[in-house]
Amino acid sequence: MTRPFLILQLRPETQASDDEFHAILEKGGLSGDRAHRIRLDQTPAIGDVRLEDYAGVIVGGGPGCVSDAPGKKTPIEQQIEDAVMALMPAITARDFPFLGCCYGIGILGHHLGGVVSKARYGEPVGVSGCRLTAEGARDPLLAGVRPAFQAFVGHKEALQALPRGCAHLVSSAACPYQMIRFGRNVYATQFHPEADAAVFEVRINTYRHAGYFPPQDAARLINMCRAAEVDMPERILRNFVARYG
């Protein structure tokens, strides 16, 4: 029997969470019966998760920041972070197939002892020009991805340096660590491989008062996203599912 993928979601906003889940299924080429969804805002602990029951783990994005001091996080943000961080030791120790998206790179970097902060490399909501590194051009998850491509981004914190044991796969001028790999099977992206213009429009409307951009800029950002040519990042999701499913 084919094992499902575990989809861990970190967004407490139902519309954004539902939209993200359906985008992961669509872009990954997954049917609903091949995915086990857990919303971490609704599931305080996931200690009974058995990795061997799954083909891989996909972690979505969210409005939280691992670099915020504990007292600066809401109880829900702390609950979500604690739940996903509790799974990371087993994932990295077993080199278990993992793909963290946006917030996921902060989770992986923080777990590995890397520096994740708001000091540099944050990117406003919009499109970032990304480029494969030499290592990225050889990586199977980037098969079929052009050497230079556009991706949707929007993050306040970022990796400040490459964590020990990681390969650097994708960079951009504004944020050097756009995609990394730990071991052979543990991946994370700073950009959103599941997002297209329609997905980002939902996010812009959901988070217009979350400090990512002035609320009055929402319509301009939506139009910018609609005009962007973003067609490569979704291949990473599809390659992940194909490789490990």
Image: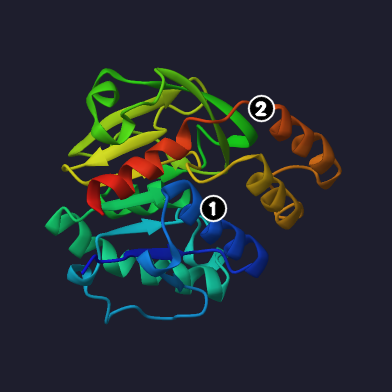
Q: Is residue 215 visible?
A: yes
Tell me the kind of residue under disc 2.
Ala
Report x, y in % for residue 62.
54, 57
> Could you tell me how far apart the alpha carbons at marks 2 and 1 are, in whole angstroms?
18 Å
For label 1, the residue is 23
Tell me the kind of residue under disc 1.
Ala
**Circle 2 — which element?**
loop
Q: Residue at x 16, y 53 (%)?
A: 95
Report x, y in % for residue 104.
41, 52
Q: Quadrant of residue 163?
A: top left
Quadrant where the image shows the C terminus: bottom left
Q: Nearer the viewer, residue 78 or 135?
A: 135
Q: Residue at x 67, y 65 (%)?
A: 15
Coloring scheme of the render? rainbow
Q: Residue at x 24, y 60 (%)?
A: 55
Q: Is residue 115 visible?
A: no
Report x, y in % for residue 165.
17, 39
